[in-house]
Amino acid sequence: MSQPSILQQSPVRLLSLDVFRGLTVAAMILVNNPGSWSHVYGPLKHAEWHGCTPTDLIFPFFLFIVGVSISYALGSKKGYMSHSKLIMTALKRALILFGLGLFLNLFPKVFTEPMEAFQTVRIPGVLQRIAVVFFITAVIFIKTNPKTQLRLLIGILIAYWAMMTLIPVPGVGYANLEKETNLGAWLDRSLLTEAHLWRSAKTWDPEGILSTLPAIGTGLFGVLVGTWLKRKDREESVKISWMFSIGILAVILGLIWDLCFPINKALWTSSFVLYAGGLATIGLALCYWLIDVQGYKKGTTPFVVYGVNAITVFFLSGLIPRILTMIKVNMPDGTTVNSREWMYETFFSPYFSPINASLAGAVTFILIWLGILWWMYNKKIIIKV
């Protein structure tokens, strides 16, 4: 996932941020496209519920990057462009992102059974959450100063903790953090109905309404780090030292809060915001120090090409597998499979163990996209959203 293209219009651009974004997007595509969902290495899966795997960090890292990008893209424009114009530009991009996410959820059923497709379409989603977080975070950045943004971040985390752990859930009678009976799940079912929630559960959604509130906190975390990073009145060594320090402190606070409000990506708990935001800050600080300060740029191009066209590759990497499942192939034994299964069974399954065949399929998908994106990068093709 790339942040909306307003960044690409900014005169200031960090190579380390492009690399960090590219790494994040490539990792997202890797975990979203295994050769077989029945055979996946543990670190490439989400935690069952409470806890955190490397895969759970990918989405918050991206939202953190969105926040950093907002501070760079909009920071220089606040002084000479009207706030209303900046907000309308952000709204337009948010609506496009939200629409792309809905289209992915509708496809391909919208072309074969349109009525049923709209009656059962999942309304939340990854792109939809990016859209909402981007717009609200952008408005907050435009209308407030860093001190207010920090207070809002703290307030959001405390308020979400209080709502999830203190408010009795209607129909249940007590506050809880279980999958189907927590306050967020109840709100999603009440407002969106089960027909429009995550297909794998129907009773709750990992990108639900209430958990979008702390996700905005993740975006604000990135805004604050970006604002600090682009300051010109601090030496690079000071900025990097503070970023490492803040990152470590946030991780520690997240782990402490985990004792009473467990780290949970699906609920996007406040402890998860601090834990993931701290690790993202450390990761960006490391990239910034190595690439922009020390000048180690060799080998960064593969990640840059993913980073500059991130929304494009994320959207198409979700669309193309759906198209492949529509194409049927007749097998020698008389059975019929979709073309995606045929490619997996033909080129990977016979040559690797099941789990390594699945990984090889995912890595091949990454490499194919790398070739396409590299060509686009060389041709200076950047698709703006």
Image (cartoon, rainbow, N blue to C red):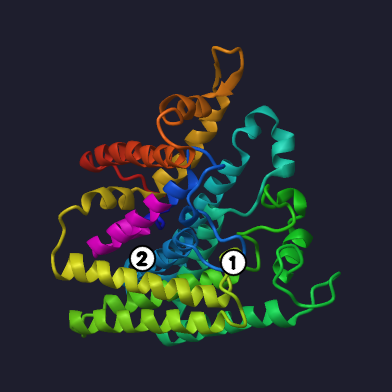
What residue sits right under mark 2 in the picture? 69
Examine the image and state in which quarter residue 292 appears.
bottom left
Mark 1 or mark 2, whichever is nearer to me: 1
Q: Position of residue 223 (x, y in %)?
A: 40, 74
The residue positioned farthest toward the front in the image shown: 353
| Residue 25 position within the rendered picture, expressed as x and y whole percent measured from the top left | 39, 53
Residue plotted at (46% across, 44% down): 315
Q: Amino acid at mark 2?
A: Ser
Most prominent secondary structure in the magenta stretch? helix
* Residue 385 sits inside the magenta stretch: no
Left or right of residue 314, residue 193 in this image: right
Residue 256 locus on image (x, y percent): 52, 84
Of residues 350 and 22, the one nearer the viewer is 350
Q: Residues within 10 Å of mark 2 (few under 14, many from 20)?
A: many
Magenta span of residues: 6-27
In the rendered structure, does residue 15 fall within the stretch colored magenta? Answer: yes
Secondary structure under tag 2 reads helix
